[in-house]
Amino acid sequence: MRILVTGTAGFIGFNLARRLLREGHQVFGVDGLTPYYDVDLKRRRHRVLESHPNFRAEILRLEDAEALRRAADAAKPEIIVHLAAQAGVRHSLEAPREYVDANLTGTFNVMEAAHAHGVRHFLFASTSSVYGANLQAPFRETDAADHPLSLYAATKKAGEAMTHAYAHVWGIPTTAFRFFTVYGPWGRPDMALFSFAEAILAGRQIELFNAGQMERDFTYVDDLVEAVIRLLPLAPETGRPVGAADSLSPAAPWRAVNIGRGAPVPLMEFLAILEKALGRRAQTVFAPMQAGDMASTFASADLLEDLTGFRPSTSASLGVPAFCEWLLAYRADPEEVCARAAAGLQA
Ligand SMILES: NC(=O)c1ccc[n+]([C@@H]2O[C@H](COP(=O)([O-])OP(=O)(O)OC[C@H]3O[C@@H](n4cnc5c(N)ncnc54)[C@H](O)[C@@H]3O)[C@@H](O)[C@H]2O)c1
């Protein structure tokens, strides 16, 4: 199939694109290589993908409607997976406009491409952050998620609403994934695991927000990719819910699906697993809760399992060492790691 993936130079887009290429799909990548974090890492991810003959990419900003339209016309996608976004809760306090531009205007332009090409399934990356002030755990897709705590979460919630409207008006079957703290090889340097590991290796102090009293439903990236691959053919159909846990809209072929393990890990435990994997102790200092943050996230994976027969299961004690192995190799010789990844893609 011809699949347009936005955000292919990003952490999740890169890992998903590799899997799609291995499965024989044609992947058209779109990414703006934004400077939010190390652009060299983004370029290297793209270089790995470009070693495969079925991958083509356009470097453009989603806000550039005309450039995106041309790229989509060239790709003629049957499916669009929209992952590109300005991510991160904390950065949305410092640079709120980047979220409005990328996540609202950008998402609207991608929706227009989905409409123009009559895609058979539009898949959009939302986030566990939309559950915001929700206190009921685990978080279920049928729960109200009406109280976002950060502008990041609010733009993702808006993306869910906008894609729902297009699903209703134009009949575009849409799945909004709610990803829960994804980690693993080729990860994001701004996220806790990557930045903690870098700090430990450099002997720098780590700030633990909310005095370390946080927990996250950490999801290993290979599990997440498996879930997305299984959801690709499952375009929602109005009036055909899969069971009581289904979030299928009564008015459109649209549903939200959590992608998380359903097993939150306390941050201090996660840090201890990281220290063990690196064989070094962290120097830590407690800091207050950050504005916009959630103390805990906890996915219900029931709907994902009902739909796909699959639940993420990789534990932190397996996933964190796999990440550390990648990070140490990448820090030692990034070109060698790219060459090995490119060779793995051809195999
Ligand atoms: N990683 C997680 O834990 C997590 C959790 C919840 C939701 N998500 C969502 O999943 C998606 C992918 O996340 P990720 O972790 O791979 O992030 P990422 O930052 O690594 O990837 C996003 C990519 O989008 C590109 N991009 C950003 N703004 C753009 C714009 N305006 N135009 C074109 N390209 C642009 C960036 O250059 C980047 O390569 C995002 O939508 C994110 O909000 C991620």
Image (cartoon, rainbow, N blue to C red):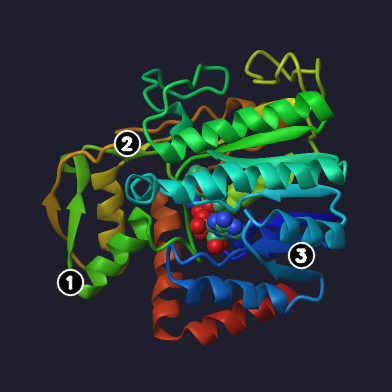
Q: Which label lies toward us, 2 or 3?
A: 2
At x 40%, y 50%, the residue is: 316
- Classify residue 153 by image quadrant: top left
Q: Is residue 23 visible?
A: no
Give the percent coordinates (x, y) of residue 117: 87, 46
Q: Secondary structure at mark 2?
A: loop
Give the percent coordinates (x, y) of residue 189: 39, 63
Q: Secondary structure at mark 1?
A: loop
Q: Residues within 10 Å of mark 2 (few under 14, many from 20)?
A: some
Badge 3 is on which residue? Answer: 21
For ligand 1, tell me if the residue under mark 2 lies within 8 Å: no
Badge 1 is on which residue? Answer: 203
Q: Is residue 242 positioned above or below 322 on the image?
A: above
Give the percent coordinates (x, y) of residue 344: 67, 75
Q: Is residue 205 visible?
A: yes
Badge 2 is on which residue? Answer: 292
Is 255 on the left or on the right of 120, as rendered?
Answer: left
Q: CA distance from mark 2 to mark 3?
A: 37 Å
Check disc 3 and give the amino acid type: Leu
At x 41%, y 37%, the residue is: 151
Position of the N terminus, as image quadrant, is bottom right
Check disc 1 and give the amino acid type: Gly
Q: Which label lies toward us, 2 or 1?
A: 2
- Classify residue 284 by image quadrant: bottom left
